[in-house]
Amino acid sequence: MVESDDFKMRALLQRVAWARVRGGQSEVVSIGPGLLVFLACLEGDGESEVDVLAKKVAEYRVFPDAEGRTNLSVQESEGEVLVISQFTLAADTRKGRRPSFSPALEPERAKELVNRFSSELAGKVSLVAQGFFGEEMEVELLNRGPATYFLEYPCASS
């Protein structure tokens, strides 16, 4: 039996020159330079986890400053953010050859938290776009670096 305390909200960040996502109706959402954030909500996650993780993402220093050092956040670099809900990041892969998605939060509640995450970010960065919750999507991006970071709640304060 998997303990729910073993799992926490997760975000996979990719620093991008651009990113775009196509939904089922051929709708396209895109951003310029910034972060592509794949977000997974897990059982037990709520508003407080979302708020802390959104703040962490906005302030996480992964962009180069004038000297080329990784010293700026997406907020400071005036970058954009594309948030895509990705429940597969909630997978428990510890046993067997097939992932278990039992740690994932039920879809209706997860959608609420993803929307809240995007809203929290919108107050901190220049532009926040969002993928198509619960739909099959095509995601394209140009990764800068490459630079990919994995954040989990609980996370230390900035």
Image: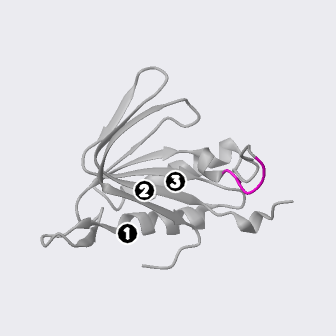
Where 15 sits versus 68, above or below? Answer: above
Counting from the top left corner in percent of width and height, residue 124 is at 34, 62
Q: Residue at x 71, y 61 (%)?
A: 44
Secondary structure predominantly adopted by residues drawn in magenta: loop
Indicate which label's residue lies in the foreground, 3 or 1.
1
Q: Secondary structure at mark 3?
A: helix
**At label 2, which amino acid type do we have?**
Leu
Asked if the residue under mark 2 is in contact with the one under mark 1, i.e. CB atoms within 8 Å, the reply is: yes
Q: Using residue 129 as the reference point, say whether residue 65 is left or right of it.
A: left
Q: Residue at x 30, y 61 (%)?
A: 74
Q: Residue furthest left?
A: 66
Query: For residue 72, which numbered disc appears in the image?
Result: none
Q: Secondary structure at mark 2?
A: strand
**At label 3, which amino acid type do we have?**
Arg
Q: Nearer the viewer, residue 5 or 142?
A: 142
Q: Residue at x 66, y 48 (%)?
A: 109
Quarter holding the N terminus is bottom right
Quarter holding the C terminus is bottom left
Asked if the residue under mark 2 is in contact with the one under mark 3, i.e. CB atoms within 8 Å, the reply is: no
Query: For residue 116, which numbered disc appears in the image?
Result: 3
**At label 1, which amino acid type do we have?**
Tyr
Q: Residue at x 49, y 23 (%)?
A: 24
Q: Residue beneath label 1, please?
A: 60
Magenta extent: 91-96
- First in sequence, mark 3 or 2: give its number: 2
Q: CA distance from mark 3 to mark 1?
A: 19 Å
Query: For residue 13, which numbered disc appears in the image?
Result: 2
Q: Secondary structure at mark 1?
A: loop
Q: Residues within 10 Å of mark 2 (few under 14, many from 20)?
A: many
- First in sequence, mark 1 or 2: give its number: 2
